């Protein structure tokens, strides 16, 4: 609103009584208090650091000041909140700087923790994760304070945004807490060999390579990498082959003929197991007679290894290959399923046999 300049003939007293707090400059009042409408209020800037940078740069360089003013004019207003391009650039630059500082701090802390030889791998990993969470939390709070972000300006979005974040990150935080608990009780740690089941239900085993924020990385012998959510390892049954000891017993099933010397066959089985380099001498391999099968006498060779991450199927293969050669050298038969067919005699069967015999005899006579 434009106000007319006061008449020159009007007395100073009358002018003062009408507008006691007004300051007139060039015929236009700059502050008319409550009696005169003021210009529309400027929207509040949510990033105080942007205004401080603009003032500091403006005092030193007019060219940069013009550039910053231009960026500040490119803005979007929503109610009392005003976000300019300058605010966005300042926040982005601050986030990049804070990220780099936090990343360097985490790397330095991990290097310091690795030099602490008193910590085992699981304790070291747990300490690294806790330090990382602490550094990122401090970095976020410091960034908000350094940039001067007015969080109350975003209060209109806080309800819906917080609800969405709560539902969206519920599993993420659950997996994070589960991973920390697994490391604290040391039930699962990097390097352990665990048995896992795939989607078809087939069970295989793999070695834990990494325990991450969300999932555990398990690599099998065929270089397939499974990412198992931490919560699954908390609530489901897990077969850990190296929880308290890395010794694993392997069973090799063997069948020999009923006509062989089973004591000699047992000696050959022990010799075959002991010939494999990865089989432990203590505890020594043992042989159990399992059962009298349909076509063979079935034995089980028990042997122990200490490096299950190197595979167990190759141990069975090595034992069976060696045993094959030893059994053949001793003339011991490895049986295969055989079936004897017994036909019950009756009148119809006797007539059939007689007819076949007569026909065969007739064909022989014609041939002579």
Image (spheres, helix red, strand yellow):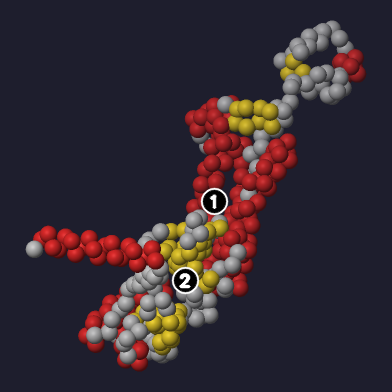
Q: Would you place residue 339 above or below residue 42 in this image?
A: below
* Nearer-the-camera pick, 82 or 17: 82
Instruction: Kindly state the secondary structure of the residue where label 2 is placed.
Output: strand
Between disc 1 and disc 2, the foreground one is: 2
Residue 247 x %, y %: 45, 81
Residue visible at 60% across and 31% down in the picture: 84
Q: Is residue 111 visible in the rendered structure shown here?
A: no
Residue 233, quarter of picture: bottom right
Pick out the residue farthest to the left. Answer: 368
Question: Which residue corresponds to mark 1?
Answer: 98
In the figure, 69 relative to 268: above or below? above
Quadrant the N terminus occupies:
top right
Instruction: From this view, report whether residue 55 is shown above or below residue 246.
Output: above
Residue lying at 28% horizontally and 77% vertically, measured from the top left = 321
Q: Quadrant of the C terminus?
A: bottom left
**Residue under circle 2?**
193
Percent x, y for residue 25? 73, 18
């Amino acid at each position: 609103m434009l106000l007319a300049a006061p008449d020159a003939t009007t007395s100073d007293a009358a002018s003062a009584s009408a507008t006691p707090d007004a300051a007139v400059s060039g015929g236009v009042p700059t502050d008319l208090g409550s009696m005169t409408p003021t210009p529309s209020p400027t929207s509040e800037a949510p990033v105080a650091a942007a205004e401080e940078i603009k003032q500091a740069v403006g005092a030193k360089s007019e060219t940069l000041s013009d550039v910053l003013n231009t960026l500040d004019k490119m803005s979007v207003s929503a109610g009392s909140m005003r976000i300019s391009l300058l605010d966005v650039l300042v926040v982005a630059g601050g986030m990049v700087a804070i990220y780099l500082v936090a990343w360097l701090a985490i790397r330095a802390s991990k290097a310091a923790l690795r030099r602490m030889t008193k910590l085992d791998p699981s304790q070291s990993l747990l300490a690294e994760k806790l330090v990382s969470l602490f550094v990122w939390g401090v970095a976020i709070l410091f960034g908000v304070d350094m940039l001067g972000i007015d969080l109350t300006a975003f209060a209109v979005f806080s309800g819906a945004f917080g609800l969405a974040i709560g539902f969206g990150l519920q599993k993420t935080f659950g997996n994070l807490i589960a991973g920390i608990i697994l490391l604290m009780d040391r039930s699962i740690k990097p390097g352990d060999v665990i048995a896992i089941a795939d989607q078809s239900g087939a069970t295989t085993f793999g070695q834990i390579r990494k325990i991450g924020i969300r999932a555990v990385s398990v690599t099998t012998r065929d270089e397939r990498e499974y990412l198992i959510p931490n919560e699954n390892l908390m609530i489901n049954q897990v077969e850990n082959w190296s929880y308290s000891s890395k010794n694993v017993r392997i069973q090799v099933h063997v069948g020999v003929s009923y006509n062989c010397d089973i004591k000699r066959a047992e000696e050959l089985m022990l010799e075959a197991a002991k010939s494999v380099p990865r089989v432990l001498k203590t505890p020594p391999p043992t042989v159990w007679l399992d059962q009298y099968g349909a076509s063979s006498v079935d034995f089980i060779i028990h042997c122990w290894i200490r490096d299950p991450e190197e595979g167990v199927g190759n141990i069975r293969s090595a034992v069976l290959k060696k045993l094959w050669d030893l059994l053949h050298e001793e003339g011991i038969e490895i049986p295969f399923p055989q079936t004897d067919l017994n036909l019950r005699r009756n009148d119809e069967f006797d007539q059939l046999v007689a007819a076949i015999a007569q026909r065969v005899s007739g064909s022989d006579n014609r041939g002579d």
